[in-house]
Amino acid sequence: MSTPKGGLLARLKIDWYLVLIVGMVVAASLAPARGAAGPVFEWATKIGIAMVFFLHGARLSRDAVMAGLTHWRLHLTVLACTFVLFPILCLGLAALPNWIVPDPLVTGIIFLGCLPSTIQSSIGFTAIGRGNVPAAVASASASNLLGIALTPLLVSLTLHQQGGISLSSVEGIVLQLLVPFIAGQLMRRWIGNWVKDRAKLLSYADRGAILLIVYTAFSGAVVGGVWAQVDAFEIARLLVICAVLLAVVLAATAYGSRALGFSKEDEIAIVFCGSKKSLASGVPMAGVLFPAATAGLAILPLMVFHQIQLMACAVIAQRYAARAKEAD
């Protein structure tokens, strides 16, 4: 009995990468990039964003996507959860009174609802729970691919009146997100194997770029007075809000997939692909969509939600796996 418990506890631990992300927030709070250093970090961030999406394009396997594309009902269900259910729930949260949802966090919560699903953790938890892995690969990949266009569109529709982004952001989206992604896809034929062989090394570069983006975003937020807008009590409320949001989506994906007649394997894929939000895509997108003074605050709900979703889904995946063993 000790081995399964150890494995579960290992999955419940806060990963060191998230600790580093929090460390970047602390570093930006104590020593933000200001003055002459500000433009330098902003340009480095733009290059980092382009690199992240170039690597996404180079890594995304067309064969893996095509393997599950025929299961259109499952994919439409996942996309509906990601880009319809989530935004509606987050808009509902944003409409709650200020004593429940603090005003400074409204933009970040709405932005969270507009993001695509994760890829690695969605597929990983689907595999642990013994679900439909090929369908999970296709759904998670499609979510990220469509998210390049759908997330900015949804953010524009939901936040435009609040000054969240402007039409000038379209140029940044194309140049920093779409062009590098397409370039990665086009070059995959020549560099795909090279990227695959150096996946671990390139993952460090990928994650390092995201750390830089977090630091730059929060530097701008600190200079703009972010910690004067958010206190410890509001962070505590954010934890509760994210936990409730995740619980509602998990219940909706599980019971909804059963009501729609999906198999247990498909249900597992829908639950894990439809309930997640991508930190890897969300942080770079925030750097493009929001001004420097608000980008840091905009990704705060995403950072909290990301850790909660990993912890909760680790437990759920273990339970699905246990049920599958009992059925066998």
Image: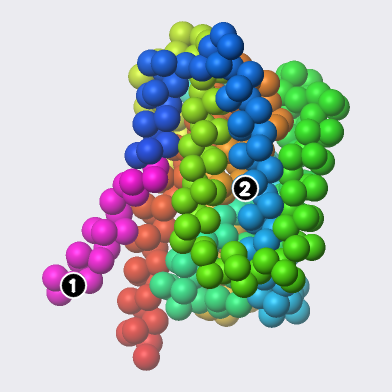
Q: Position of residue 204 (x, y in %)?
A: 47, 51
Q: Is residue 65 visible?
A: no
Q: Is residue 198 left or right of residue 17?
A: right
Q: Nearer the viewer, residue 170 or 5?
A: 170
Q: Position of residue 265 (x, y in %)?
A: 53, 78
Residue sitting at 81 percent across and 41 percent down? 174
Residue sitting at 63 percent across and 19 percent down? 39
Query: Is 100 covered by the magenta stretch?
Result: no
Q: Which residues are magenta?
A: 1-18
Quadrant hosting residue 192 = bottom right
Residue sitting at 54 percent across and 41 percent down? 209
Q: Which mark is residue 194?
A: none
Say what secondary structure mark 1 lies in.
helix
Give the tally of numbered discs: 2
Packing grade of label 1 (10 A; few <14, some 14-19, many >=20) is few
Amino acid type of the residue that numbered disc 1 sits on in the rendered structure: Thr
Q: Which quarter shows the C terminus?
A: bottom left
Q: Position of residue 254 (x, y in %)?
A: 53, 63
Residue that mark 1 sits on? 3
Query: Is 13 covered by the magenta stretch?
Result: yes
Residue that mark 2 sits on? 52
Q: Nearer the viewer, residue 257 or 9?
A: 9
Amino acid type of the residue that numbered disc 2 sits on in the rendered structure: Val
